[in-house]
Image (tube, grey):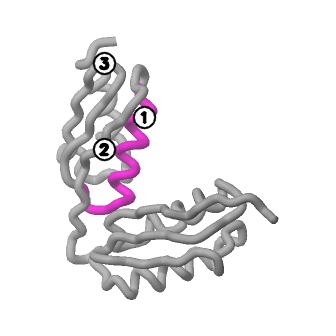
């Protein structure tokens, strides 16, 4: 499959994705079975949606995410407010041991730390905070350990 066909397929997916209001701000470059995404979006959720769309295109094996997040004024939140929302979201998820996870936020970037027994718990914690308003990015440093 040619690079141009892959690029066109991804651009089409981005244009049709309602989660990405300004898809034209994302540049797509295919090189073999790898694709690089560049540009700026208004939220971390939009960035994740673009990467998911690229992964779904035929012929794509690797997606290199170079998209930047620039939060617009209506989506900006104080770090303490984001941390509170993240902690609440983790507590609401019955599959996540919220008491085992530390949350810190700096300039909208959330860092998760702690220990859980299963990978799905770490994945769920990431998902719980990734879509919160005001989040510019997430670093998941949660460790999966053996149950005693």
Q: Position of residue 136 (x, y in %)?
A: 32, 66
Q: Which numbered disc, 1 or 2, marks the residue that appears first in the sequence? A: 1
- Location of mark 2 (residue): 65
Q: Is residue 52 above or below residue 74?
A: above
- Picture quarter containing residue 121? bottom right
What residue span does the magenta drawing correspond to? 41-57
Residue in the foreground of this view, choosing between 51 and 75:
51
Whole-number angstrom distance, CA of label 3 to CA of label 1 = 14 Å
Q: Which mark is residue 46?
A: none
Q: Helix, strand or loop at disc 2? A: strand
Horizontal side, residue 64 vs residue 29: left or right: right
Secondary structure mostly seen in magenta is helix
- Picture quarter containing residue 147? bottom right
Q: Is residue 32 above or below residue 101?
A: above
Q: Helix, strand or loop at disc 1? A: helix
Q: Which residue is found at the position 74% from the left and 58% from the top? A: 146
- Picture quarter containing residue 104? bottom left
Horizontal side, residue 112 vs residue 92: left or right: left
Q: Position of residue 71 (x, y in %)?
A: 24, 68
Whole-number angstrom distance, CA of label 3 to CA of label 2 = 16 Å
- Location of mark 3 (residue): 32
Q: Which mark is residue 55?
A: 1
Q: Is residue 6 above or below residue 78?
A: above
For the residues bearing labels 3 and 1, Cβ distance under 8 angstroms: no
Q: Which residue is found at the position 56% from the left and 82% from the top? A: 88
* Neighbours of disc 2 within 10 Å: few (<14), some (14-19), many (20+): some
Is residue 52 one of those drawn in magenta?
yes
The mark total stands at 3
Q: Which residue is found at the position 34% from the left and 55% from the top? A: 46
Q: Which numbered disc, 3 or 2, marks the residue that appears first in the sequence? A: 3
Residue in the foreground of this view, choosing between 11 and 128:
128
């Amino acid at each position: 499959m040619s690079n141009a066909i892959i690029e066109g397929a991804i651009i089409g997916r981005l244009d049709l994705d309602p989660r990405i209001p300004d898809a034209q701000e994302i540049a797509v470059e295919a090189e073999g079975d790898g694709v690089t995404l560049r540009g700026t979006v208004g939220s971390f959720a939009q960035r994740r949606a673009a990467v998911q769309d690229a992964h779904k295109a035929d012929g794509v094996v690797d997606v290199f995410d170079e998209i930047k997040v620039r939060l617009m004024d209506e989506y900006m939140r104080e770090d303490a407010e984001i941390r509170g929302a993240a902690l609440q979201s983790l507590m609401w998820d019955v599959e996540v041991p919220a008491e085992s996870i530390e949350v810190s936020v700096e300039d909208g970037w959330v860092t998760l730390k702690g220990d859980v027994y299963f990978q799905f718990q770490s994945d769920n914690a990431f998902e719980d905070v990734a879509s919160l308003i005001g989040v510019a990015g997430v670093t998941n440093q949660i460790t999966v350990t053996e149950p005693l």
